[in-house]
Image (spheres, grey):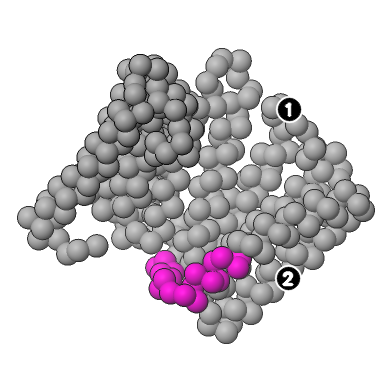
Amino acid sequence: MDVARLLPDRALKPRWSSATALVYIGAFVALTSTTALFAIVQEDHGDAAFVGYSVIAFALALGGALWLEQAERAVAAGVLATITVLFFGLVVGAFENLVGLLDLDETDDGYQPGLLVVELVLITAAGVALRRFRAPLLVLVAAVTAWAAVADLGSLFEWDDAGELLSLAVGVVLIAAGVVVDGAGQRGFGFWLHAVGGVALGGAVVALVSGGFGWALVGLLSLVYVGAAYRISRSSYAVLGAVGILTATAYFSLDDVTLFALVPAGEPSAPGIEPWQSVLWFVGAGLLIIALGLLGDRLRREAGEPEA
């Protein structure tokens, strides 16, 4: 498959600055706030009003994206195009909810075919918008939606851990796609494929493992991630590897492991381990992460590669 035909000629490369940060933060706040507003509209005025206001939000976002593109504000246009795609998916979901194809209020884990339609629409719309606006942020929408769509299929199977195993498979596919895109000279579009793929794969492994041996595998996978970061020059794997090292450390030294239990402050130590020993575990983990960073820097210098 010719990747060049599926992607624009070149990715939009936002220059990180105060202005760019404000655009991204403002867009996120507007998106979450508007979504919360729609929930209020649906509750107060019904499903038909929900559809109508969703269409208005979609139209306004699309018009704003096109206006910003015309004004040569490419970064802001790409961000607003991403919001447009999400609103379009919301329009489809709201309409399905109105006609009874999708129940947005369903609280159980049953699979809804209407949800797959929304997910396919989001992926398709993200692809169309990507061709025009060249914003890598749209790849994030497509990758996360694809992950969710495949993982949702796990509820159709009777066997345990189906969703986790499907997430693992999605992670492998997204990472492979990222490598292919990088190889085609489109690294700007590959970032989110690697990032989402790494989270999907690593998250699935964490969800599947149990016991000391399983969490030792998490630690080993974390080292593999760090190695991959240097091998393919993707720092997202270094970040995920560091998180994995800290999570495994938390398992062996703390009584309770949560996403935020990556430092020992305020957390009880594991049975048979004194609090000072828990802290010492994390000191060792921090020093290991530093050592891995210094090793990678040394390898980069020996290879004559420029500083990232």
The residue carrying mark 2 is: 60
> What residue is at 79 percent from the left and 61 percent from the top?
55
State which quadrant residue 224 falls in: top left
Seen in the picture, residue 238 relative to 61 is either above or below; the reply is above
The residue carrying mark 1 is: 108
Seen in the picture, residue 124 relative to 216 is either above or below; the reply is below
State which quadrant residue 281 falls in: top left
Instruction: Point out the image quarter for the C terminus.
Output: bottom left
**Location of residue 27 in the rendering, given as x and y in whole percent from the top left corner:** 61, 66
Neighbor class of circle 2 (other Cα within 10 Å; few <14, some 14-19, many 20+) is some
Marker count (numbered)? 2
Look at the image and tell me whether residue 54 can be seen. yes
Look at the image and tell me whether residue 176 can be seen. no
Q: Which residues are magenta?
A: 9-27
**Location of residue 192 in the rendering, given as x and y in whole percent from the top left corner:** 44, 52
Mark number for residue 119? none
Give amino acid for label 2.
Leu
> What residue is at 49 percent from the left and 65 percent from the top?
135
State which quadrant residue 160 falls in: top right
Q: Is residue 257 left or right of residue 280?
A: right
Q: Is residue 199 left or right of residue 161?
A: left
**Location of residue 26 in the rendering, given as x and y in whole percent from the top left corner:** 60, 68
- Confirm whether the magenta stretch covers residue 179: no
> What residue is at 75 percent from the left and 31 percent from the top?
107
Q: Is residue 55 left or right of residue 71?
A: right
